Amino acid sequence: MKAVIRAIATYLPEAVLTNDAIAASFPDWPADKIEKKLGIRARHISGPQEFTSNLATAAAERLFAQTGVDRASVDGLIVVTQTPDYLLPTTACVVQHELRLQKKILAFDLNLGCSGFVYALSVAKGLVEVGLIRRLLLITADTYTKLLDPTDQAVRTLFGDGATATLIEGVESERNFIGSFDFGTDGACASDLMAHGSAMRLPAETMTSCLRMNGAEVFAFTLRAVPPSVEAVLTQSGLALEQIDLFVFHQANVYLLEHLRQKCRIPREKFVVAMAECGNTVSSSIPMALGQVLVQKRLRNGAKVLLSGFGVGASWASCLVEWADGDAS
């Protein structure tokens, strides 16, 4: 039994924050400068009464509508989020109920950010390939904008809200559709991207409960960690960089991605950049980019795609996915 990605659906909140609107608050940061530096024109913002479970449910309902998959056949649910509706219960339990999924279902959250989709793929692969789960719904959803200080232009220009739903199921095949994997963690960098006072630890007197980012350190960590991770996946897979059809990295910002592309020596035509209309959507950025690639028909059956997520934690993960259209065998 092999785990394979069958479909991806995306949901973005209705409200949009444009560069022009941001520039009105930061006159020294004009709209054209934001787009040139970050590669972002707009980002979607969850409403005051719109939370992670709402986004997650909407993405999954869209997937069911697009694929015609019977929701009663789903026996696994993973929700990747760092902005849960509650500290407890787990968001997956809320989403299971809202989606009217069967009660005999494995359901839990993964508290990971930008690397979360790749981590969750490894968990989904394990659950499916040992025979515990046959059809799994992997949801990524975050409402990071609820953590942002509106006066902090560094984070306000970057992050947007959104969700994706990815259908993963087991098939009898000799092909390895998901994997090899490479993981890494450096908790010494934890404070470089942190929402102080967002849970049990109170903020220091000089801090607020908003998300704070040390952009220079996050940039340095990424250039230090990601290229070796990409190389590790290639080595495990026995593939050369030239044999990879597409590279889909966490959509942090175009400035960082271009430095990564050059350092990894990836041809521009194989490197996916897909954040202009949604911004940095954290755990959803990789599956959202994959969704755009699918719409553009850039994925053929058997295409080899290298994914790499990196960021908050600091945490990173890379993996190889072989795309399968129709009946995988």
Image (tube, rainbow, N blue to C red):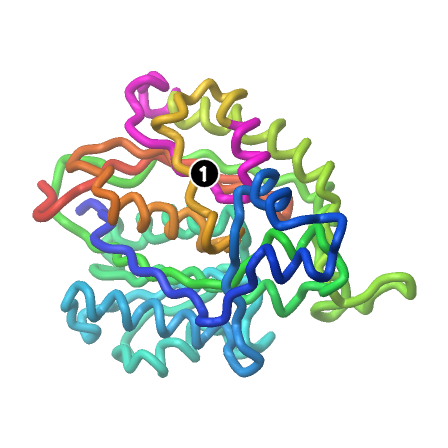
Horizontal and vertical percent for residue 89? 52, 78
Between 264 and 112, the one lying in front of the other is 264
Q: Is residue 180 visible?
A: no
Taking the spot 11% from the left edge, 44% from the top edge, the residue there is 328
Taking the spot 22% from the left edge, 69% from the top edge, the residue there is 64
Taking the spot 43% from the left edge, 71% from the top edge, the residue there is 55
Q: Name which residue type carries label 1.
A: Phe
Q: Which residues are magenta?
A: 235-260
Q: Quadrant of residue 167?
A: bottom left
Q: Is residue 113 above or below residue 203?
A: above
Q: Is residue 136 above or below residue 58?
A: above
Horizontal and vertical percent for residue 305? 31, 34
Find numbered disc 1 in the image and state the secondary structure of the residue it sits on: strand
Residue 240 covered by magenta stretch: yes
Taking the spot 35% from the left edge, 28% from the top edge, the residue there is 270
* Residue located beneath label 1 in the image: 249
Horizontal and vertical percent for residue 44? 50, 64
Side of 247 relative to 142 (left or right): left
